[in-house]
Structure formats: structure tokens, C-alpha cells
Image: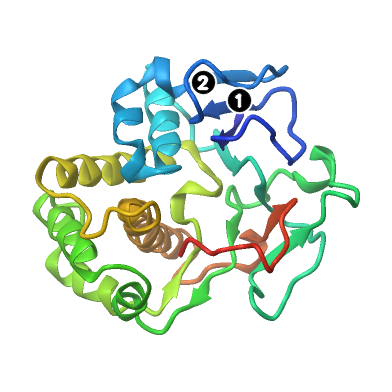
Amino acid sequence: MHSIFCITHQPKITIDLDPSASIVWLGTAGQAPQTEQQVLDVHQAYPDLMAWHPFLAGTSGTFAVRRFLSDQNRDFSDFDLITLVQYRKFISRCSFGSTTASFPSMRFINQAAQVPSYSAWFAEPTQYFCVSSPRNIGNTFQQYAHVHQAPDFLRYLAIAVELEFITAQECFELLNHSTIIPGGIEFGTFPINIFLSLTEQLEAVCLHFLERHRPVKLDAYHRRALSFCNERLGSYLLQKVLHEIFDNTIPQEIIGYMHTVDIGATEYRAGT
């Protein structure tokens, strides 16, 4: 079994999808795209997640997928996989488009050119994973504090320690960690059981955070702090899993290329 979910708040999906994929709708209520794919309307299925959407952004879709799979009450095998893409972004073992000096880790595909077909960009992973290329950011806390608001990250991690998802020592390691997998557990291909386990932890941390706090800044960009925190904790937890499976390494065979369709590098703003 291989389940594919495309998370979107836009009715126009610019990447090519297989008919078996599911659309996870985060846009305006009642305006989900009319498509041959199954649509998971988060407004209807999980309204509490939409209530928190201003703070969770696309992560609301990730949590909706987790709940949708958990609600099936079935036992997934280690060979059951999930692929998560976004309406204009995907990860592929094949490379398309071109890069720029500004964003060397992202490949840009002009929609005026031919957008790769689903059969071209999608390939079953040989090692059950396909993740974005790990990126050296020097120091996780310093990088976060430079781009975002440090108190948000510290409060978030304090809750993760309180809930015993990470130890105090692991929190220290995460703060000083030099490597991030962009997108963490929310973007790419993973065994479903690993996805469910890690995203359940992320959701619990987020909901506990929102019970007690609000992000330091509430403008449209910084209020999404939890999404940025999730990327870092999700990346750290994912790296731990990968190191356990692959003997303290991340094999090249599971690393893919990140792609963005229908937007130029001059317009692109990295969320990280």
C-alpha cells in the first residue's frame, strides 16, 4: 500500500498527481477543488484543526492526514508507505528544472515549460524513504533565532520535554544540532507507521502549546511559528529514526530533490 496526499490551500494544483492521490483541502470552506482525486476537506473532517490553522498553516493538513489514517483503525505493515506533497512542491529522486545561487537546495520548474508527469517524478523508493537533502545550518537554535522568535522555539521544546517526547539531553542536542532535513516528517515518502508515530508527537506538542501560549508575533508570517518549530523537531526525530535504521548514516539512495512549480526563485520565500 502506498498512500499519496497533496496538501493545498489553493484550488489550482500545479504538480501532476496520480488519480489515486488524495487532496487535503485547507482553503476556503466549501471551495474544495473539483477533481478526480479523493478530497479530504479538513473544514468538515477536523474543524478544530482549521480553528488553529492561522498558527499551524500547512501543518494542519499534516495532522489531518495523521488523523484520517488513524481513524481507519487498521494495522499498517512496515511496507505501507505515505508520500506527502504540496500543491506546487514535491520531492523526487529525479531532478527537473534548475537551481539558483539563492536557493541551491530547491529546483524551480517554470510552468510555461512542461511540468513533469506523475509517472516521471514519482518512483517507488528502494529503501522505503525519500527525503529532502539534509542541509547544514550551523546551529539549530541560532538559525531559528535569526529568522524567527526564539521564545516560541524554547517554549515549544519545553513542552516536548515535559511530554517526554525528547529528554533534556536530546533537547540540548537539538538546539545545537547542525543539520536539518527541510520539511522534516511532513514532506517526502516514509513508512506510514513512522509517519504516524512522529506526527502524533508533533500534534500533541502543538496543541499543548496553543492551550498555554500564542506566538510572540502575530503577523501572517511569524504566527506560523509552530510550523517552523515542527520542521526542526520533526527533522531531528526523523534523523534519529534514519540513523537507527541505516547504522548512523543517511544513505544517498533515500535523498531526493525538492521542486517548486510555477514560481521563480526571485519570488520564492523559504519558510525555514
Q: Are marks 1 and 2 in contact (CB under 8 Å)?
A: yes
Residue at disc 2, secondary structure: strand
On the question of residue 38 being in view, the answer is yes
Q: Nearer the viewer, residue 233 or 164?
A: 233
Going by the numbered disc 1, the residue's amino acid type is: Ser
Q: Nearer the viewer, residue 228 or 167?
A: 228
Residue at 43% in and 65% down:
243
Left or right: residue 165 compared with residue 255: left
On the question of residue 193 being in view, the answer is no
Q: Is residue 201 above or below residue 7?
A: below
- Whole-number angstrom distance, CA of label 1 to CA of label 2: 7 Å
Residue at 13% in and 49% down:
213
Q: Nearer the viewer, residue 235 or 64?
A: 64
- Where is residue 244? Give x, y as percent: 40, 61
Quadrant in which the N terminus is drawn: top right
The disc at residue 40 is 2
Characterize the local packing of mark 2: few (<14), some (14-19) or many (20 or more) Cα atoms within 10 angstroms: many
The residue indicated by pointer 1 is 22
